Image (spheres, helix red, strand yellow):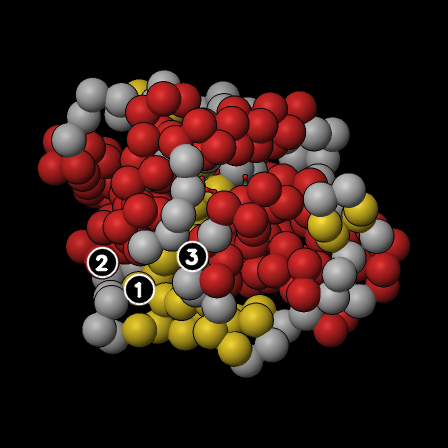
Amino acid sequence: MEKITIAIDGFSSTGKSTIAKQLALKLAYVYVDSGAMYRAVTLFAMEKGYVSENNFLKDELINSLDFIHLKFIFNEELGFSEIYLNNKNVEKEIRTLEVSSFVSTIAEVSEVRRKLVEQQQKMGFAKGVVMDGRDIGTVVFPNAELKLFITASAEKRAQRRYDELIERGDKVSFYDILQNVQHRDHIDSTREDSPLVKADDAIEIDNSNLSLEEQFEMVYLLALDKISSI
Ligand code: CDP
């Protein structure tokens, strides 16, 4: 069967990665979490002291981009790929609220975007890929056969992220998370380079009131429809 490219974009914590992972597993496609790449670069910048509460050494980060090596390695047990920053598995570390609080600032830097977009395009070259992020249908794969744009209310999204972090054992407040979600939405949608916008040919799905099963059923049918029409 022909393989297609599936681009999933949308606001923070809309559950894009859950949809993308499920789809990739079912279709035996490769799943790429582009947000994890921006998060790993953010972790690198934090570790080097390039970004903190009131400081951002943008030029230092740009000058060290060649020292940032990212790769995904498939974890058989989990059924998806985990991200490695300079050969270290950072899958858990990149999901903290602290990384979330700096990531949109890092993702605004054009040099960072250029480097990551190039890697993403290479990963999707052979098709058979599901990638989620903010600019996948607009910049990374403008020719993707299936583009989804996922939305949900800010409160719903913050609640989902809150539950996720509490489940992991992180101590966080719902209010801080809601603020982070809204703040990132604002930066991501208003930045100059590759802002978060719905591609003209993307299908918008508001999943505020959809269960995981209902949502999966919907996107899986859309994917099968697309694949069989090619
Ligand atoms: O927290 P959530 O899962 O919603 O976000 P993510 O997909 O992990 O992405 C984290 C951040 O990376 C976003 O808020 C964006 O600032 C940035 N990002 C981006 O600019 N472009 C992408 N393709 C993916 C993520």
Q: Residues within 10 Å of mark 3 (few under 14, many from 20)?
A: many
Does any atom of ligand 1 lie closer than 8 Å to the CB of label 3?
no
**Position of residue 174 measured from the top left corner of the image (x, y, whole percent):** 39, 31
Residue receiving disc 2? 25
Does residue 226 sit above or below 25 in this rendering? Answer: above
**Position of residue 33 measured from the top left corner of the image (x, y, whole percent):** 44, 53
Residue receiving disc 1? 80
Q: Are marks 2 and 3 in contact (CB under 8 Å)?
A: no
**Which of pointers 2 and 3 lies earlier in the amino acid sequence?**
2
- The answer to which quarter of the image holds residue 118 is bottom right
- Amino acid type, callout 3: Val
The answer to whether residue 110 is visible is no
- The answer to which quarter of the image holds residue 163 is top left
Q: Are marks 1 and 3 in contact (CB under 8 Å)?
A: no
Residue receiving disc 3? 32
State the separation of the CA atoms marked 2 and 1.
8 Å
- The residue shown at (68%, 70%) is 68
Q: Nearer the viewer, residue 104 or 175?
A: 175
Q: Nearer the viewer, residue 4 or 58?
A: 58
Q: Residues within 10 Å of mark 2 (few under 14, many from 20)?
A: some
**Position of residue 67 measured from the top left corner of the image (x, y, whole percent):** 73, 73
- The residue shown at (64%, 29%) is 187
In what element is the residue under mark 2? helix
**Residue 116 placement, left or right of 100:** right
Q: Quadrant of the C terminus?
A: top left
State the separation of the CA atoms marked 2 and 3.
12 Å
- The residue shown at (24%, 67%) is 78
The answer to whether residue 35 is visible is yes
**How many numbered circles does the render carry?**
3
State the separation of the CA atoms marked 1 and 3.
9 Å
